[in-house]
Image: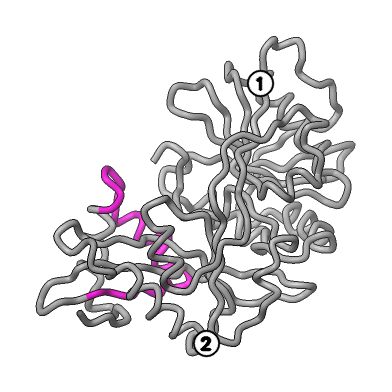
């Protein structure tokens, strides 16, 4: 079994693998959005003339203790059924870890699906904690909080988002850079544009950026992502909750956040309670910066994902 870095000549094979691993996805659109941006680094496991599986790094700008570094979101880890139970997933992740320094990737992180947990750990990833689903019921409608802030649709390369990020990053120790360029690519350029980004405005001042998407049955509104200026995270959630109550028939509002982070932010004060959790993993190269392995540093949200819709 040979594991090698994919080249431009492997494009069609990678697109075929994406189509297999995510049924119903527009694989060509995903290639343009996720793979051409960065661009992605993909490793293939090959036996003879057959491609057995793949894994990818999607380069991400991270904010670490006051400076930008190059990291990667891990994604699209897949082994074809005929080749499973041979340790190929672990081999792919080992190869990607060995190549991190050469490609200037300081860390790879994410909250993977259950099938990828064991291969990732075998390949060198470490479990740092858990990402939690925080949920708040929205009935009866009269319980919607009264709040002066309002949501306005986000524009492409919106300068208000840059202003928010300029303040917000002072409070963040480690997380994805959430500036206007990121929000434009992550939400406004995403296939289908199912996740709608907004700027939260209070008395003429932008205090937060967020993105929302409802489930297909219309019962749940997901706060896909939210970043706020210092001390305005909970007020931003109140404003988002009011917007959802007034504009939709959703029964519940949810967001993803590290369990430890959500507890520190006292989300229960705005009605959000901790529900299901899933492991959060991080990989650094041999001898890499161990600050990435500190769960207390991480700010992680729904934008730290490689899917353009919660309904995929």
Q: Is residue 116 above or below residue 262?
A: below
Residue located farthest toward the left when viewing the structure as drawn: 49
Q: Secondary structure at mark 1?
A: strand
Which stretch did the figure color magenta? 21-45
Which one is nearer the viewer's eye here, 77 or 150?
Answer: 77
Give the residue at x 72% y 53%. Answer: 161
Quadrant for the C terminus, please. top left
Q: Position of residue 235 (x, y in %)?
A: 83, 36
Give the residue at x 73% y 44%. Answer: 262
Quadrant for the N terminus, please. bottom left
Give the residue at x 63% y 38%. Answer: 255
Q: Position of residue 244 (x, y in %)?
A: 66, 25
Q: Residues within 10 Å of mark 1 (few under 14, many from 20)?
A: some
Q: Secondary structure at mark 2?
A: loop
The tag on residue 137 is 1
Which one is nearer the viewer's eye here, 288 or 100?
Answer: 288
Q: Position of residue 129 (x, y in %)?
A: 63, 55
Q: Is residue 38 magenta?
A: yes
Residue 282: name its quadrant. bottom right
Mark 2 or mark 1: whose residue is earlier in sequence: 2
- Which residue is identified by label 2? 101
């Amino acid at each position: 079994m040979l594991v090698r870095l994919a080249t431009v000549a492997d494009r069609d094979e990678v697109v075929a693998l994406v189509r297999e691993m995510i049924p119903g996805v527009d694989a060509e659109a995903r290639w343009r959005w996720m793979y051409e941006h960065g661009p992605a680094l993909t490793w293939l496991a090959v036996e003879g003339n057959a491609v057995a599986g793949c894994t990818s790094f999607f380069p991400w700008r991270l904010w670490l203790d006051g400076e930008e570094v190059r990291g990667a979101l891990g994604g699209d880890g897949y082994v074809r059924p005929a080749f499973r139970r041979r340790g190929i997933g672990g081999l792919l992740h080992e190869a990607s870890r060995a190549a991190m320094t050469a490609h200037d990737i300081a860390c790879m992180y994410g909250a993977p699906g259950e099938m990828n947990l064991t291969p990732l750990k075998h390949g060198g990833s470490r479990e740092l904690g858990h990402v939690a689903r925080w949920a708040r019921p929205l009935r009866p409608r009269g319980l919607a909080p009264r709040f002066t802030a309002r949501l306005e649709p986000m524009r492409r390369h919106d300068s208000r988002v840059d202003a928010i990020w300029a303040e917000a990053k002072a409070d963040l120790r480690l997380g994805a850079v959430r500036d206007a360029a990121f929000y434009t690519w992550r939400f406004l350029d995403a296939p289908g544009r199912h996740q709608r980004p907004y700027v939260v405005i209070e008395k003429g001042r932008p205090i937060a950026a967020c993105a929302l998407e409802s489930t297909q049955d219309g019962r749940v509104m997901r706060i896909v992502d939210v970043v706020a200026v210092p001390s305005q995270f909970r007020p931003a959630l109140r404003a988002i909750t009011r917007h959802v109550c007034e504009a939709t028939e959703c029964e519940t509002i949810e967001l993803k956040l590290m369990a430890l982070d959500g507890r520190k932010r006292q989300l229960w004060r705005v009605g959000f309670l901790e529900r299901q959790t899933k492991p959060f993993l991080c990989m650094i190269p041999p001898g890499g910066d161990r600050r990435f392995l500190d769960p207390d540093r991480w700010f992680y949200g729904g934008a730290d994902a490689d899917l353009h819709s919660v309904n995929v």
